[in-house]
Image (cartoon, helix red, strand yellow):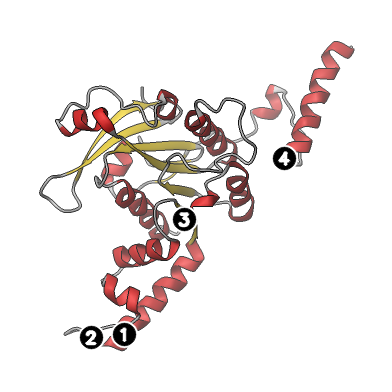
Amino acid sequence: DIERWLPTVTTQRAQLIRKGEAYDSRPSAQSDKPIPQIRFKSLLPIFNEVMRGGYRDGALHIYAGITKHGKSTTLKTHICDGVLQKQFCVLIITENTPQLAIAEIIHALSNLTMDEIASKRFVGTESETAEQRKGYYGEWLAYLDTYLRVFPWDWLNDSRLNQIARWYHPQVIAADYLHQQPGLFSQKPTNTQDEMGLFADFLLSFAKEEGICFLTAGQVADAASQKLLKGDTSTPAILYGSARVGHASDTYTFLKRHPDKTNFAYFRVWLDRFTG
């Protein structure tokens, strides 16, 4: 009858307009779709622990950290982790330039120095000639061309993220990092009081719909940062005045750089949808 037929047709037409395909709401149709699973594991055991098993289709992971405590380093390490395993990754840079991010990634993956990468003047060592090191740089660039795309800050936007998903079908997207900036939404939301919370909700839905593992980070400031610096990590920090940012994620993790040891950090998972 019409009361049962009309909602189904309306839903299908709305999905057809929005995504170019009709939506079938029957359980038998939906049960055929894959349930998000771990696509691949990290080469770093700590990342597997934080992500509760590895890089999962349709997961949103958010790190919270204080200024200069490793948010960018952690997200770029995730990108290196993915491309080394030949997984297609996308990096969105909101704090620096794409060229600097690419230089840092090549530096992390190789034994080339940042000075060499920036100047394109390579220096020989006891075991390698300058020409060999120049060749390594070209090889790493070619490798990254196969498995990585890097976008500037204005691509952290709802419609542009959907474009990235359609064009590249990445396994991993990392946004370095999440903060209040113009243009998060292509159309201004009606609730402008909690735009960051709304955008975090969008990121979760986007990751689920596209089957992408999305990683980002937010900065803890003011009194909350002082509390964390003193070692009190018992309560999840509120990012940008919105508790929804952390609660939208599948895992919400605090990270803090070790005061003395380089590239050594502490992680505490505050919220976790996978294991409770």
Question: Where residue 59 sits: x, y (%)?
Answer: 47, 36
The residue pinned by badge 2 equals 124
The alpha-carbon separation of the residues under discs 2 and 3 comes to 32 Å
Please tell me which residue lies in front, 99 or 268.
99
- Side of 257 relative to 17 (left or right): left
Q: Secondary structure at mark 3?
A: loop
Q: Which mark is residue 132?
A: 1
What's the residue at 56%, 37% (across, down)?
206
Residue sitting farthest toward the left: 260
The residue pinned by badge 4 equals 19
Please tell me which residue lies in front, 46 or 155.
155
Q: Which mark is residue 87?
A: 3
Q: Are marks 1 and 2 in contact (CB under 8 Å)?
A: yes
User: Is label 1 or label 2 in front?
Assistant: 2
Q: Quadrant of residue 133?
A: bottom left
The alpha-carbon separation of the residues under discs 3 and 1 comes to 27 Å
- Tell which circle, 3 or 4, labels the residue nearer the N-terminal end: 4
Amino acid type at image mark 1: Gln
Q: Are marks 3 and 1 in contact (CB under 8 Å)?
A: no
- Tell which circle, 1 or 4, labels the residue nearer the N-terminal end: 4
